[in-house]
């Protein structure tokens, strides 16, 4: 009965539901959340599915409890997830920092809607991209994946779990209301055909185990509650034993490691799709649903004879700095359409430095780009205006 | 009695197996009630006979929040106010664990108050031990939701204008299975309560009224830790039959102590299990309801590839 | 690459969303096409007006919204009034003749009416009006193959109502305006 309820096959499935199914396929067995449009369907699906898989679903009293709860579950060894939208992420940010500091693997889904504040609950936006990077106070490396279809929502949810387990941190999935509420074909392969990564448990004996000792990859081995390790962990700056240590030396060893454990693995984490990049004059960089809605503009530009390339970011954080830096030396410029008033375009600008033009095509959310606006920006860059 | 703080620092202490001796000395002030509270906790766990390997302790932030860091258990020092939902996740994801939250009155009833009443309402199988020192100790003596009306704090320089919460009343009214109140002076009874709670299912709440000589007493002419204990001694009475909702604490009334609630009602997880069992027949059809799964036979040798193959730009290239 | 953009409109309770779901499923699961379905949310989806949309394509659906429709299915006067302007020149309009009575000029479109709700009532259940309409749309606008549509319907309704829904489909499929 429990095994049977695992899905395999082709489904006509909503994005949010595909996300829940992706989580289950990845081995997620704990979901804590609080309802919010347009992410509630993820919670609803988990409420229905988890009990049949011997998992735990809990609707908490708010998003702060939800994130705290999935961190707790993570320490009990469960793959855990929460799903919300902008307002919920704002409430979660403190404990996202705790997750980064304690290095607790888990997945946080943000089905973005029009923002700021309550914004446009049922409509879409991409304006929480910087929040995903810098939302919680302090320095830490972070990972954000951005799907552009229900199928990819499924796929990237699995990837998010894999990265969270491998690099030991809360990983964001930055979907949006359009992808979350869109229904398309989703193929769910049997588990054997999926790559599933689990956190690395220590093989040390309790007396030899240091919860924050690390090797070349900068990632400590895990020990879960109840296995006799009786370790300590804290959101305070801590040493390898997990004990609070309020010195510069300790801070200087810990915080750069939290940043570098991601930075040093950009090549593994950064997922992109590239088309016609070779020899392009103009490269359009986009992510998420925008990468689909602006395609007519690219087709038009190509018809007009513009040498146009296209780079789609599936991983937005860590940002593929090196890649953009190299490209910026070869092209006239980049066009960055995004459903916000300039967030990822700032990163592109930073990496392009003065080597090439960066043209933002902003959109406040609640609709989608007019392809004419995107085309216009492409032409401006191509014709050097 | 007052010198449990010193006790904790002794080199080869009988509590060694449960304390992180490598973290001593601790940060608490001399005369602070936290030493007694921790001693009672350690004794209580011993008495309860639970496996230390299977016991986890979760704290929030504050002087009391530091307790987790001194105990040789799986110990989690989380963020301000969030120990309870964290502990809930820990417990639900590994139901073999005994999970104890140990934190302060501000942590559990101000910033974390909502989590407390909801965890009690759900009757999650965790124990919550709250050290009530009537003040925010860690941050230097600001007003807490427990500060008595008229008491002074650094943010109530004219005396506190606000009515305090009655912690045991709130926990009981919210649905806790077990509710008790003791002062740090009631070492034996407190230890017993902790042991009882450790072996009891459901949400258990224990308030420990505790002296904070450094900030609360100084602002309120309470004297030393010892003076405060003496005062507790004169004010405390034990009445297990008291209705917990009727025994608030203020500056000089009776401190009614006792074991006020000791009920058995289904825990969150028991209710989850019962609910699923009751509806399993409906779910038996679930797979069939999942529409096309019955139409598309899954062939063993079939390789699945994403329906949106990645060449979304194919026709443009 | 061929692409078909379908807009369905009506009011809450008519199964508008389910209709577009069935169309999308028929196309992508049973016709081996690609499809993308989206729906209106929020106040506009509560109680009163209701609309949803499906894009069917022989290739990946890039642009999932329906700004201009090849096919408009109108199950209410309001839906008809709101969405007729987005129907392409030469597009197909399918409407419930009892629910859409104030007609505008149809000279730019192929317009076909069916008393879907009445036919459903004759079958014993008004709620299958949407399925009658799907049968009609399958025949008149060829949005998907009849086999795929039938499979998708059978798949999306409670099993004890499959027969009724098949009858509803057939009634719409066989309906002849001139009759
Ligand atoms: C979000 C947040 N706000 C404020 C603080 C500062 N802070 C730390 S401890 C504390 C009060 C603790 O009071 P209580 O829970 O009663 O613990 P005590 O120190 O009295 O044991 C406050 C306000 C914090 N750490 N985090
Ligand atoms: S400030 Fe008060 S509560 Fe904190 S350690 Fe000192 S005496 Fe104890
Ligand atoms: Mg306090």
Image (spheres, coloured by chain):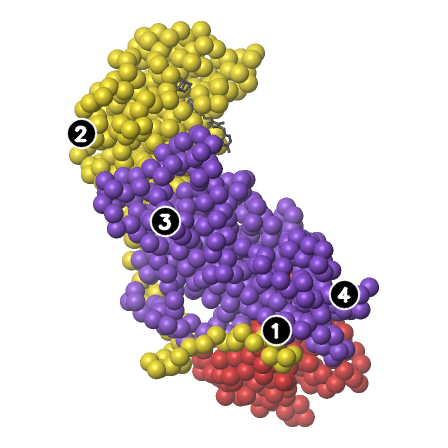
For the image shown, how many numbered marks are present on the structure? Answer: 4
Dot 3 and dot 2 within a common chain? no
Quadrant of the snapshot with the C terminus of chain B:
bottom right
Q: Quadrant of ligand 3?
A: top left
**Disc 2 and disc 4: Cα gap in Å?**
76 Å
In the rendering, which numbered label is found on residue A275? 1
Instruction: Report if the CB atoms under discs 1 and 3 are less than 8 Å apart.
Output: no
Q: Quadrant of residue A334?
A: bottom right
Q: Residue at x 43, y 35 (%)?
A: A250
Where is residue B44 shown, x and y percent of the image? 22, 28
Q: Residue at x 58, y 59 (%)?
A: A322
Chain C pictured colour: red
In the rendering, which numbered label is found on residue B29? none
Dot 1 and dot 3 within a common chain? yes
**Disc 4 and disc 3: Cα gap in Å?**
46 Å
Q: Nearer the viewer, mark 2 or mark 4?
A: 4
Image position of B94 with respect to A298: above or below:
above
**Disc 1 and disc 4: Cα gap in Å?**
18 Å
Where is residue C138 shown, x and y percent of the image? 58, 86
Q: Earlier in the sequence, mark 4 or mark 3?
A: 3
Chain A pictured colour: purple
Q: Earlier in the sequence, mark 1 or mark 4?
A: 1
Is B21 situated left or right of B302 in this image?
left
**Disc 1 and disc 2: Cα gap in Å?**
68 Å
Q: Residue at x 66, y 90 (%)?
A: C177
Q: Which residue is mark 3?
A: A215
In the rendering, which numbered label is found on residue A381? 4
Q: Which residue is mark 2?
A: B47
Assess disc 2: are there few (<14), some (14-19) or many (≥20) residues with their C-alpha within 10 Å of its C-alpha.
some
């Amino acid at each position: 009965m429990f095994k049977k309820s695992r899905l395999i096959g082709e489904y006509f499935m909503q994005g949010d539901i595909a996300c829940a199914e992706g989580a289950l396929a990845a081995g997620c067995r704990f979901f804590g959340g609080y309802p919010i449009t347009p992410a509630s369907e993820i919670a609803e699906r988990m409420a229905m599915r988890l009990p049949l898989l011997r998992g735990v679903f809990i609707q908490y009293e708010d998003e702060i409890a939800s994130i705290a709860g999935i961190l707790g579950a993570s320490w009990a060894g469960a793959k855990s997830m929460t799903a919300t939208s902008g307002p919920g992420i704002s409430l979660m940010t403190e404990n996202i920092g705790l997750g980064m500091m304690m290095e607790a693997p888990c997945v946080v889904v943000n089905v973005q809607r029009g923002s700021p504040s309550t914004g446009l609950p049922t409509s879409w936006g991409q304006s929480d991209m910087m929040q995903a990077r810098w939302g919680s106070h302090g320095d830490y490396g972070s990972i954000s994946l951005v799907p552009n279809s229900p199928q990819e929502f499924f796929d990237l949810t699995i990837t998010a779990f894999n990265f969270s387990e491998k690099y030991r941190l809360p990983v964001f999935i930055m979907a949006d209301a359009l992808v979350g509420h869109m229904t398309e074909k989703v193929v769910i392969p049997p588990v054997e055909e999926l790559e599933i990564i689990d956190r690395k448990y220590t093989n040390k004996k309790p007396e030899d185990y240091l919860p924050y000792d690390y090797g070349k990859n900068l990632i400590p081995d895990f020990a879960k509650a109840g296995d006799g390790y009786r370790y300590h962990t804290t959101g305070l700056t801590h040493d390898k034993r997990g004990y609070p240590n309020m010195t510069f030396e300790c801070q200087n060893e810990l915080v750069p490691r939290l940043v570098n454990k991601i930075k040093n693995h950009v090549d593994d984490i950064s997922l992109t799709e590239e088309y016609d990049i070779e020899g392009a004059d103009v490269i359009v960089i986009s992510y998420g649903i925008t990468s689909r809605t602006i395609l007519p503009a690219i087709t038009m530009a190509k018809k007009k004879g513009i040498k146009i390339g296209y780079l789609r970011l599936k991983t937005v954080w860590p940002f593929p700095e090196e890649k953009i830096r190299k490209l910026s030396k070869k092209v006239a410029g980049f066009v960055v359409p995004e459903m916000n008033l300039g967030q990822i375009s700032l990163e592109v600008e930073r990496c392009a430095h003065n080597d090439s033009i960066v043209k933002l095509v902003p959109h406040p959310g609640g609709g989608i780009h007019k392809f004419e606006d995107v085309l216009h920006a492409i032409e401006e860059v191509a014709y050097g205006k | 009695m007052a010198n449990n703080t010193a006790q904790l620092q002794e080199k080869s202490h009988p509590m060694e197996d449960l304390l992180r001796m490598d973290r001593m000395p601790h940060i608490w002030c001399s005369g602070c009630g936290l030493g007694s509270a921790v001693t009672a906790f350690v004794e209580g766990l011993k008495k309860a006979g639970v496996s230390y390997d299977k016991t986890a302790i979760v704290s929030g932030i504050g002087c009391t929040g530091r307790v987790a860091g001194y105990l040789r258990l799986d110990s989690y020092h989380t963020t301000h106010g969030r120990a309870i939902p964290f502990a809930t996740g820990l417990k639900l994801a590994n139901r073999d664990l005994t999970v104890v939250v140990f934190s302060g009155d501000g942590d559990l009833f101000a910033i974390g108050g909502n989590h407390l009443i909801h965890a009690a309402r759900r009757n999650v199988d965790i124990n919550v031990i709250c050290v009530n020192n009537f003040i925010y100790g860690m941050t230097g003596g600001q007003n807490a939701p427990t500060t008595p009306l008229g008491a002074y704090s650094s943010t109530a320089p004219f005396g506190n204008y606000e009515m305090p919460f009655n912690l045991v009343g709130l926990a009981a009214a919210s649905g806790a299975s077990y509710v008790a109140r003791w002062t740090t002076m009631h070492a034996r009874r407190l230890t017993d309560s902790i042991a009882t709670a450790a072996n009891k299912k459901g949400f258990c709440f224990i308030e420990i009224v505790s002296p904070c000589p450094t900030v609360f007493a100084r602002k309120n002419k309470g004297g030393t830790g010892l003076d405060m204990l003496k005062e507790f001694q004169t004010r405390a009475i034990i009445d297990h039959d008291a209705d917990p909702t009727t025994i608030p604490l203020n500056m000089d009334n009776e401190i009614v102590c006792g074991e006020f609630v000791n009920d058995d009602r289904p825990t969150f997880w028991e209710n989850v299990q019962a609910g699923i069992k009751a509806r399993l027949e409906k779910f038996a059809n679930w797979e069939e309801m999942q529409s096309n799964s019955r139409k598309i036979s899954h062939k063993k040798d079939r390789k699945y590839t994403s329906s949106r193959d990645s060449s979304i730009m194919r026709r443009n290239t | 690459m061929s692409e078909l953009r379908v807009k369905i409109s009506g009011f809450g309770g008519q199964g508008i969303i389910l209709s577009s779901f069935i169309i999308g499923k028929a196309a992508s699961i049973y016709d081996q096409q690609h499809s993308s379905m989206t729906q209106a949310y929020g106040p506009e989806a509560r109680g009163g007006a209701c609309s949803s949309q499906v894009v069917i394509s022989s290739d990946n659906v890039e642009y999932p919204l329906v700004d201009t429709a090849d096919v408009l299915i109108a199950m209410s006067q309001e839906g008809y009034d709101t969405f007729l302007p987005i129907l392409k020149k030469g597009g197909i309009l399918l409407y419930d003749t009892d629910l859409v009575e104030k007609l505008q000029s149809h000279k730019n479109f192929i317009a076909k009416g069916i008393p879907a709700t009445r036919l459903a009532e004759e079958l014993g259940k008004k709620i299958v009006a949407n399925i009658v309409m799907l049968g009609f749309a399958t025949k008149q606008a060829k949005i998907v193959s009849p086999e795929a549509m039938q499979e998708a319907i059978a798949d999306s309704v409670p099993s004890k109502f499959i027969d009724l829904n098949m009858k509803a489909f057939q009634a719409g499929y066989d309906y002849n305006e001139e009759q």
